[in-house]
Image: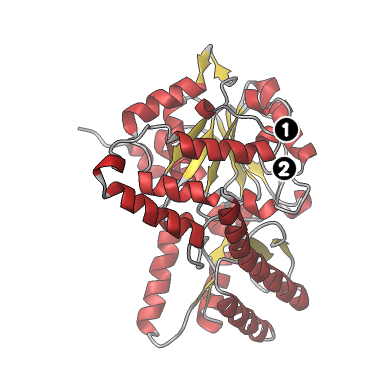
């Protein structure tokens, strides 16, 4: 028996595990200190009432013989796929139900999709980048090339001058909060069609683009149905971080080497996936109802308000930052520090704020820092007050 030696190429621990360990060590030494968690993308507001009601009704269904549900369809129940299709129709995107796959979250699908791709594919990922994009490909042994993000390109790298087979794009971006416009995404679609490449488009934060003229789906760009897969999640848009539900769109028109990627993914899911629970899918369906949409929008407005307060504070302090407008993340230049892990420790010890060091997102993240708006308004105000006091000493 041999182990997968590709795991030896990974960092010793996943970014947020390392942060949790450092925070736990600090908390053990200072048990009376109240820490303000502004680092991760975990939601703090409870589920919308329409969602909770749907869970209760679904639980009652499961308690009656005539409405009990066992194994569901691997691709998802039609009632939820119909709701997703209607949501895309509002975006001007027509999807068949067969092109929509219900999942237990975007992170899982982003990793599991690699099952249908050869290990010989060259992968391109932005730098800085959500670590899971890199780690899942390192585990499979694929060659990785980086698309450098920097202040000069607003952390939105464009198509490279080299060939890549699989390309990860995330808009609004995690960690930088930057979002592509239509012209920029059209350039990526043109590149993918020319190079016979595939775009893996992470739209987990698309709900934060509401009210802008920025595209909320890659399929709003002509030609994307022939070169893109879109992965989305209800974790951030509807507070499903602890419920787990998302969806992946694989167009029927998407083929490579004479093979339908839609058919490949369905075959993979039929073998390795037993579907998302009936209760969760009924909860997700409620998100797309008029009541659910209105209620989740109110919840998102709380996080948007937090982001505005954080952005106003950073401007007041003269700290350069990106994001925070159509994104729950603010990506800031570490004030007075070149080492983002040193700034992490400085914030933790002197302001009791937990953020995320930019270096954890790749080499281009060094010297930068991510703050998350996923918190309560009260905690956000307190964190910004403590940041103000701290800044006067830098």
Q: Is residue 113 left or right of residue 305?
A: left
Residue 365 appears in the figure: yes
The percent coordinates of residue 347 (x first, y second) are: 56, 77
Can residue 145 be seen in the rendering of this structure?
A: no
Q: Which residue is drawn at 59% across and 52% down?
A: 363
Q: Which residue lies furthest to the front in this view?
A: 66
Percent x, y of residue 323? 70, 59
User: Observer-nearest residue: 300 or 193?
Assistant: 300
The residue at 75%/33% (across/down) is 186
Give me the residue at 26% from left, 50% from top. 63
In the image, is 307 to the left or to the right of 238? right
Q: From what the image shows, is residue 222 above or below residue 356?
A: above
Whole-angstrom CA distance, mark 1 to mark 2, is 8 Å
Question: Which quadrant of the figure contains the N terminus?
Answer: top left
Above or below residue 84? Residue 374 is below
**Considering the numbered disc 1 on the image, is that residue within a helix, a strand or a loop?**
loop
Going by the picture, which residue comes out furthest to the top?
258
Residue 303 coordinates in the image, percent (x, y) = 61, 66
Q: In this view, does 135 lie to the left or right of 201?
A: left
Residue beneath label 2, please?
215
| N-terminal label among 1 and 2 | 2
Q: In which quarter of the image is the C terminus?
A: bottom right
Determine crowd level at label 1: few under 14, some 14-19, many 20+ residues with C-alpha closer than 10 A.
Answer: some
Residue wearing tag 1: 221
Q: Where is residue 20 in the image (x, y as percent from the top left)?
A: 41, 66
Secondary structure of the residue carrying tag 2 is: loop
Nearer to us in this view, 175 or 183: 183
Q: Do the residues labelled 1 and 2 touch (CB within 8 Å)?
A: yes
Other residues around mark 2 within 10 Å, as few (<14) / some (14–19) / many (≥20): many
Quick one: which residue is furthest to the left in this view? 1
Please count the marks in the image: 2
């Amino acid at each position: 028996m041999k182990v997968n030696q590709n795991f030896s190429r990974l960092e010793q621990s996943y970014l947020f595990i390392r942060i949790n360990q450092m925070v736990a060590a600090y908390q053990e030494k200072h048990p009376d200190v109240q820490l303000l968690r502004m680092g991760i993308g975990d939601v703090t507001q409870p589920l919308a009432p329409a969602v909770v009601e749907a869970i209760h009704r679904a639980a009652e269904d499961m308690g009656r013989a005539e409405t009990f549900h066992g194994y569901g369809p691997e691709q998802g129940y039609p009632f939820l796929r119909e709701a997703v299709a209607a949501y895309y129709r509002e975006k001007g995107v027509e999807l068949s139900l067969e092109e929509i796959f219900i999942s237990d979250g975007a992170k899982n699908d982003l990793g599991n999709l690699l099952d249908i791709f050869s290990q010989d594919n060259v992968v391109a990922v932005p730098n800085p980048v959500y670590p899971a994009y890199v780690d899942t490909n390192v585990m499979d042994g694929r060659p990785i090339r980086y698309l450098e993000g920097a202040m000069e390109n607003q952390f939105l790298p464009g198509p490279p001058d080299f060939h890549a087979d699989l390309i990860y794009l995330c808009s609004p971006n995690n960690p930088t909060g930057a979002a592509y416009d239509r012209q920029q995404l059209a350039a990526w679609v043109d590149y993918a069609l020319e190079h016979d490449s595939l775009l893996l488009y992470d739209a987990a934060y698309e709900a934060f683009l509401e009210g802008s003229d920025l595209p909320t789906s890659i399929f709003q760009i002509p030609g994307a149905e022939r070169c893109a897969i879109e992965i989305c999640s209800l974790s951030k848009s509807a507070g499903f971080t602890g419920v787990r539900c998302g969806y992946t769109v694989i167009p029927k028109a998407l083929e490579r080497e004479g093979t339908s990627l839609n058919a490949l993914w369905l075959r993979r899911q039929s073998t390795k996936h037993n579907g998302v629970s009936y209760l969760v899918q009924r909860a997700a369906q409620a998100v797309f109802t008029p009541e659910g949409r209105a209620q989740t929008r109110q919840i998102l407005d709380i996080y948007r308000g937090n982001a505005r307060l954080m952005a106003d504070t950073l401007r007041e302090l003269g700290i350069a930052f990106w994001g925070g407008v159509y994104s729950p993340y603010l990506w800031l230049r570490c004030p007075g520090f070149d080492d983002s892990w040193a700034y992490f420790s400085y914030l933790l010890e002197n302001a009791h704020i937990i953020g995320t060091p930019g270096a954890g997102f790749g080499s281009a993240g060094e010297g930068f820092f991510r703050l998350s708006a996923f918190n309560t308004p009260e905690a956000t105000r307190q964190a910004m007050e403590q940041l103000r006091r701290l800044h006067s000493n830098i």
